[in-house]
Amino acid sequence: MELIKIALFVSFLFLNPPPCLSSSTPLNCTDTTRLCTSFIAFKTNPNTTLPQILSMFDVFPNDITADEASSPGYLFIRKNCSCLSSIKKYLTNTTFTVRDAEGLVYPMVTEAYGGLAFLPNSTRRARMRAVVSLHLFCGCSSGLWNYLMSYVMEEGDSVESLSSRFGVSMDSIETVNGMSGPNDAVVGNVYYIPLNSVPGLPVDTEVSPAPAPAPAPIVDTFSDNQKQHSARFPYGWVLGSLGVALMLIIVTLLSCISFRSFHCCSRDRRRQTKDPDQSVSHKFHILKSTSFVNASGRYLCCKSANLKPSNGETGNQHVSIPRGMVADAFDMEKPIIFTHEEILSSTDAFSDSNLLGHGTYGSVYYGVLRDQEVAIKRMTATKTKEFIAEVKVLCKVHHASLVELIGYAASNDELFLIYEYAQKGSLKNHLHDPQNKGHTSLSWISRVQIALDAARGLEYIHEHTKDHYVHRDIKTSNILLDNSFRAKISDFGLAKLVVKTGDGEASATKVVGTFGYLAPEYLRDGLATTKSDVYAFGVVLFEIISGKEAITRTETMVLNNSERRSLASIMLGALKNSPNSMSMASLKDYIDPNLMDLYPHDCIYKVAMLAKQCVDEDPILRPDMKQVVISLSHILLSSVEWEAALAGNSQVFSGLVQGR
């Protein structure tokens, strides 16, 4: 039976070959600064999941709408489209992860995107789990319409059917695509549909609760009129809704009673033990022994924790965590609570051999908890503010470019946060004197990919979460690398919710962070905004180019002394004497020698200019992280094309430039 299925599948491929990637031609453009919103019509199949689609197109769930009227279903994916300066064509960028096995990229991309991708090099090969940058067809309207949507012509489609389906005239479709008539359409080619509104309906990414079951029908006692009345009146829904409402009321009452009882007991215990710290009004009791209810999926979550002593002790072992922590921090997903004994065992009692490094508010240790590699941040109990801030943020935000919080633990005088483990350490260790730290230096391609990953993580917390956050401590030591050298932003102890003001989003606060990365307006008035993070990210880009630290020593002419200067000021000075990528002698003096001149000059110059924009004195003139992501996507694609043109399929060179 399996052989028959395989034979039928192969014969189907021969009779219905996938559309050729190069059969369509991108739209011409002249304005290389043009940026617009476009849409891509993607034909789904039952085996493609939403997370796969988000990865394939590098978008978020709110960038996708669905055409529920068509079968098979179409998704309409919103992408920023721009004029690619090298070929003067409208294209948009994305990345494709090779999931099956090593081989030619061309047929993999053809099968995945169904003719929407533009990949001129049909002989390129890639290893499994490699990330391939590629273009997708897109277009910007000349002004007659609001959007253009890329659509692959299918069997049975025609200009007339597309006109009816999307509510546009046949003449409009023919004009946009330069067609002489409706019969010019070729199956498998990409055509552009002019639109004045967003196509489709929003995709429901939430799991909807199942409706209450309707009571079984009684067929032998109803008259015809009674049956008709029953069909019109939804008894099942009414009874189900009443049942659900009654259950909610009961649960709420029980919760209130339990909550009041807990606080009464807590007050009684404090009176009986005469706590010397009685001046602290609220104590949250975390004991060494805790029971767990459930752990599922990637995120280890628990439904409830046993807060009662298990060894007969009185409740005098406490940590000063504000009372609102339980209600506020865990209103989304609850991280699992580990026991203190588990933490000690997993780290060999915090032995020096397990020490990974020192953070702003504690040391980080390697451990293995419940067969999972983890990083454990050890903090004193006085750091409850930072502890709660990190838990509150990481329980609400989940993204591939943000480090994942697994759980936490506490003892009498210490707090512990447990994260997923980043096997390759921090970006800082790979940039600053990597050989002496036992790390490999990073290739140019790896550096741009890391910068893009980190930028996507920042863009996510700035724009795409329900509540927007400012990280406030972006630096190379807080950008961690996994086993594939993909970046994840960590250390959210200083992250702060930003609120809308008349001038945008900002949060007034005391100045915290790391010198060398602090924006001038933040130092001046303590106003934390998303543009403060952009400034810090610009410094990170300068570090990626130069391999130097944010505050570095430079030699002076006076008595051979050295002085400490910010890297931003040094690099800005070098850029003043580097007008373009062909005349950047001053900038070349500050390019990391570990790159061994293996980099495209135009790309490294573009990153330097992007960093310059990010560290502009005026925050209004700085780009937002969405613009930074777009720029780095273009630079990464150009860098990959440079590598392919220079190295071909040489495995020796490929291993060298990947820095692995």
Image (tube, rainbow, N blue to C red):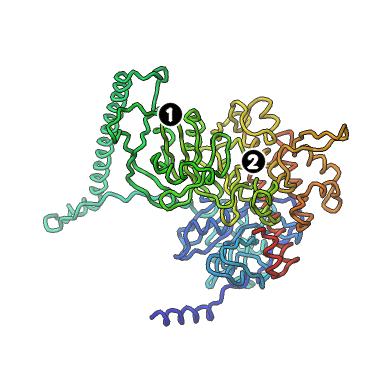
- 133 or 264: nearer the viewer: 264
The N terminus - image quarter:
bottom left
Q: Could you tell me which residue is drawn at 76 percent across and 50 percent down? A: 592
What amino acid type is highlighted by mark number 1? Ile
Residue 544's spot in the image, x, y percent?
70, 48
Spot the residue most to the left: 221
Mark closer to the chain start, 1 or 2:
1
- Residue position for label 2: 475
Residue 144's spot in the image, x, y percent?
67, 53
Q: Could you tell me which residue is drawn at 42 percent across and 79 percent down? A: 5
Q: Is residue 139 above or below residue 402?
A: below
Residue 548 appears left or right of 439: right
- 638 or 185: nearer the viewer: 638
Residue 68 falls in image quadrant: bottom left
- 160 or 9: nearer the viewer: 9
Residue 631 appears left or right of 155: right
Residue 233's spot in the image, x, y percent?
24, 48
Residue 124 falls in image quadrant: bottom right
What amino acid type is highlighted by mark number 2? Lys
- 202 or 131: nearer the viewer: 131
Task: Judge whether residue 97 can be spotted in this image.
Answer: yes
Task: Specify few, some or many for label 1: CA neighbours under 10 Å numbering under 14, 14-19, or 20 or more.
Answer: many
Q: Is residue 651 above or below residue 448?
A: below
Q: Could you tell me which residue is drawn at 40 percent across and 44 percent down? A: 342
Residue 520 appears left or right of 327: right
Residue 523's spot in the image, x, y percent?
68, 28
* Disc number placed over residue 321 in the picture, else none: 1
